[in-house]
């Protein structure tokens, strides 16, 4: 990392000290095995290798389970809770770097923002609502965004407030709800946060397209919200569309067609 990312360099130095204590690796692996996330002996014992192994595994259900296991521990008090929170923070470093970049403005220094983001990640790890047991990594990042935006933006006017974001059911909501979740990010941050959330499939593509359009001025926020309404309406439809509904659908497609073309050209 460059000299403008001293906060994350310092975090890595601190992590090396945490990993130097072999007892920490054994403790964390024991929690994961005790929770039934992995069989005994399947995971590395050394903490640095263990976290790298957990983070590298591209299995959403597995990721949700080990993260919830550590978040549950982090919600307690004492040194073990602090260790659990520290492991979560380290696993989220790539996302925190992207989030820091998305929160930069001409008036904000990278390290100043990074310090806030890291502090808010600790808060999110210690206070995470454990009822959210799906897309856990994305929800931890969104909780961090919530805290960081409030702390950084208390003295700035914002086009979109984020306070409404946290009532959206992240694990049980339909596609439209999750699209709305992605859109409740202020204009200058939309694409970066959509990337951070790591949504996949058609849902992720729609979030990314709408967010990109808003971010690049190709789609008005009001239009994007109208598209969300059309998506929700179509998902709930049980009978043939009315003429008015077909008109709304055609209008949404008309708005999205040039945005999609620009997005593909930019890619």
Image (spheres, grey):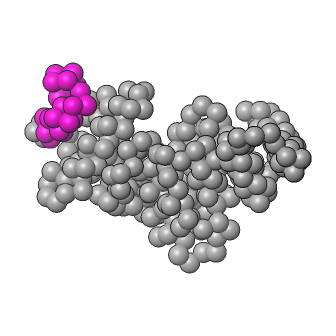
> What percent of the width, then of the height, locates residue 148?
47, 63
Identify the magenta region: 24-45
For residue 157, what is the image quadrant?
Answer: bottom right
| Residue found at x 21% / y 31% | 36
Task: Work out whether residue 210 can be spotted.
Answer: no
Position of residue 122 in the picture relative to residue 77 (left or right): right
The foreground one among 196 and 167 is 167
Report how many numbered discs are placed on residues in the image. Answer: 0
Q: Residue furthest left?
A: 23
Pick out the residue farthest to the top. Answer: 42
Work out which quarter of the rendered image holds the C terminus and state it.
top right
State the residue lying farthest toward the bottom: 155
Task: Describe residue 229's horizontal placement relative to residue 189 as left or right.
Answer: right
Residue 194, image x, y percentages: 59, 46
At which x and y percent is residue 144?
A: 44, 57
Q: Up-down: is 17 above or below 158?
A: above
Q: Residue furthest front?
A: 239
Residue occupying the point 16% across, 60% down: 77
In this image, 187 relative to 252: left or right?
left
Quadrant for the N terminus, please.
Answer: top left
> Residue 59, can we see it?
yes
Instruction: Tell whether position 133 is magenta.
Output: no
Give 232 or 106, whichever is nearer the viewer: 232
* Residue at image point 19% right, 57% down: 76
Instruction: Give 78 or 35, whichever is nearer the viewer.
Output: 35
Q: Position of residue 3 (x, y in %)?
A: 46, 50
* Residue 203, quarter of picture: top right
């Amino acid at each position: 990392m460059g000299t403008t990312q001293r906060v994350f360099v310092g975090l890595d130095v601190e992590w090396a000290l945490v990993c130097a204590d072999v007892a920490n690796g054994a403790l964390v692996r024991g929690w994961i095995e005790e929770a039934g996330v992995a069989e005994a002996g399947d995971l590395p014992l050394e903490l640095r290798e263990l976290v790298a192994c957990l983070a590298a595994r591209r299995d959403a259900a597995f990721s949700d389970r080990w993260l919830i296991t550590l978040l549950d521990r982090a919600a307690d008090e004492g040194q073990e809770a602090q260790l659990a929170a520290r492991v979560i923070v380290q696993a989220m470093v790539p996302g925190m770097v992207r989030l820091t970049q998305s929160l930069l403005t001409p008036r904000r220094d990278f390290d100043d923002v990074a310090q806030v983001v890291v502090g808010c990640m600790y808060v999110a790890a210690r206070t995470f609502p454990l009822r959210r047991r799906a897309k856990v990594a994305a929800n931890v990042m969104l909780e961090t965004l919530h805290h960081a935006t409030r702390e950084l933006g208390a003295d700035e006017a914002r086009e979109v407030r984020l306070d409404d974001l946290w009532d959206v059911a992240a694990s049980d909501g339909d596609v439209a709800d999750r699209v709305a979740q992605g859109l409740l990010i202020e204009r200058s941050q939309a694409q970066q946060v959509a990337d951070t959330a790591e949504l996949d499939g058609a849902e992720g593509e729609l979030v990314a397209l709408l967010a990109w359009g808003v971010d690049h001025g190709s789609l008005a926020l009001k239009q994007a919200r109208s598209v969300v309404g059309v998506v929700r309406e179509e998902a709930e439809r049980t009978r043939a569309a009315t003429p008015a509904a077909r008109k709304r659908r055609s209008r949404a497609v008309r708005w999205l067609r040039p945005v999609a073309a620009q997005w593909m050209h930019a890619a």
